[in-house]
């Protein structure tokens, strides 16, 4: 059975769909279910075809014994919709308000850590690096460390490659394309090596304490457009992980449709001219 045939035939019973969605939820915090049946079945059928599994029972048995296949399934279900300079008003807020407040407590050459989590295929993490180079005069006065993390190992491989098509690059000014990207080749442009090496990428799971703790603490976290895929319990869990990942006084940037005020009362909401940001208060 091909992936297309499996998906169109009603691949899973209600019980089987629930079993699979429960497994995904435990690993990622993302709440799928009956409303997402077609999407889940399509991705499942692709993985069953790729692994040579003819039925759901056999594939579930494979998931119980293969961490690599669990990762591949999660990769296939992850949404990686992003582009350079997305929600750039937050990048403006970063240089006009957040970083000046952070470095007031630092000396020249001190470490400033910024985290893009999840970073998808790298555009958002690299956007931070580009924006700082173009718009923050003090970028060379401090040791700025930018980390991009994601649960999707396939997306991270694309981020390291840093080869982007026209849609991802559409919002960048022509001067940025000229200065920081290699000439177009085969419809894509690759970020220059210096910029590729200015951002580090790691695998991390927003609801998994150990993988989050391994990243250390940050002054600014961009965690945009992921909490909308979580249910209430997962959002509370993620909020706790993000709190732990922030230095006291650090800032959290969410997507425009997300609000920490409805999830946790531990963060202080700050209204700046360009964005609403959430802060872990100073101890």
Image (spheres, helix red, strand yellow):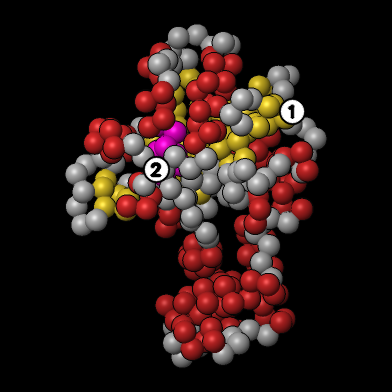
SS category of the residue bearing label 1:
strand
Q: How many labels does the image show?
A: 2
**Depth check: 97 or 108 in front?**
97
The verdict on residue 117 being magenta is: no
In the displayed structure image, the side of residue 236 where residue 152 appears, left or right: left
Q: What stretch is highlighted in magenta?
A: 123-129
**Depth check: 229 or 170 in front?**
170
- Where 264 sits versus 136, above or below? below
SS category of the residue bearing label 2:
loop
Taking the image as drawn, is residue 159 in sight?
no
* Residue 16, image x, y percentages: 67, 80
In the displayed structure image, the side of residue 257 where residue 162 appears, left or right: left
Q: Which secondary structure class fits the magenta region best? A: helix
* Residue 237, image x, y percentages: 72, 47
In the displayed structure image, the side of residue 18 where residue 173 appears, left or right: left
Which one is earlier in the sequence, the residue at label 2 or at label 1? Answer: 2
- Between the residue at mark 2 and the residue at mark 1, the CA separation in whole angstroms equals 31 Å
Q: Which of labels 2 and 1 is toward the front?
A: 2
Q: Residue 268 carries which label?
A: 1
Task: Name the residue: 46% across, 91% down.
Answer: 1
In the displayed structure image, the side of residue 116 where residue 206 appears, left or right: right
**Depth check: 68 or 235 in front?**
235
Residues packed near mark 1 inside 10 Å, few (<14), some (14 to 19) or many (20 plus): some
Task: Name the residue: 47% across, 15% down.
Answer: 110
Q: Mark 2 points at which residue?
A: 171
* Residue 221, image x, y percentages: 57, 34
Q: Which mark is residue 187?
A: none
């Amino acid at each position: 059975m091909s992936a297309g045939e499996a998906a169109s035939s009603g691949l899973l019973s209600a019980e089987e769909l629930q079993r699979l969605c429960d497994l995904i939820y435990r690993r990622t915090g993302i709440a799928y279910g009956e409303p997402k049946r077609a999407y889940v079945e399509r991705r499942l059928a692709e993985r069953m075809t790729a692994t040579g599994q003819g039925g759901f029972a056999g594939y579930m048995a494979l998931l119980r014994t293969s961490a690599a296949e669990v990762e591949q399934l999660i990769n296939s279900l992850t949404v990686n919709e992003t582009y350079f300079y997305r929600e750039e008003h937050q990048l403006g807020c970063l240089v006009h308000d957040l970083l000046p407040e952070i470095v007031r407590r630092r000396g020249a050459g001190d470490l400033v850590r910024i985290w893009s989590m999840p970073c998808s295929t790298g555009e958002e993490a690299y956007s931070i690096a580009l924006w700082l180079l173009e718009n923050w005069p003090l970028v060379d006065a401090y040791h700025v460390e930018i980390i991009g993390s994601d649960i999707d190992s396939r997306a991270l491989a694309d981020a390291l490659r840093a080869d982007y098509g026209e849609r991802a690059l559409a919002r960048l000014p022509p001067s940025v394309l000229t200065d920081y990207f290699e000439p177009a080749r085969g419809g894509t442009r690759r970020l220059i090596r210096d910029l590729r090496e200015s951002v580090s990428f790691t695998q991390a799971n927003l609801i998994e304490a150990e993988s989050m703790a391994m990243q250390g603490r940050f002054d600014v976290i961009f965690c945009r457009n992921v909490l909308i895929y979580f249910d209430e319990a997962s959002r509370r869990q993620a909020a706790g992980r993000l709190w732990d990942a922030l230095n006291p006084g650090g800032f959290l940037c969410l997507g425009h449709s997300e609000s920490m005020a409805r999830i946790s009362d531990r963060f202080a909401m700050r209204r700046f001219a360009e964005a609403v940001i959430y802060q872990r208060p100073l101890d």
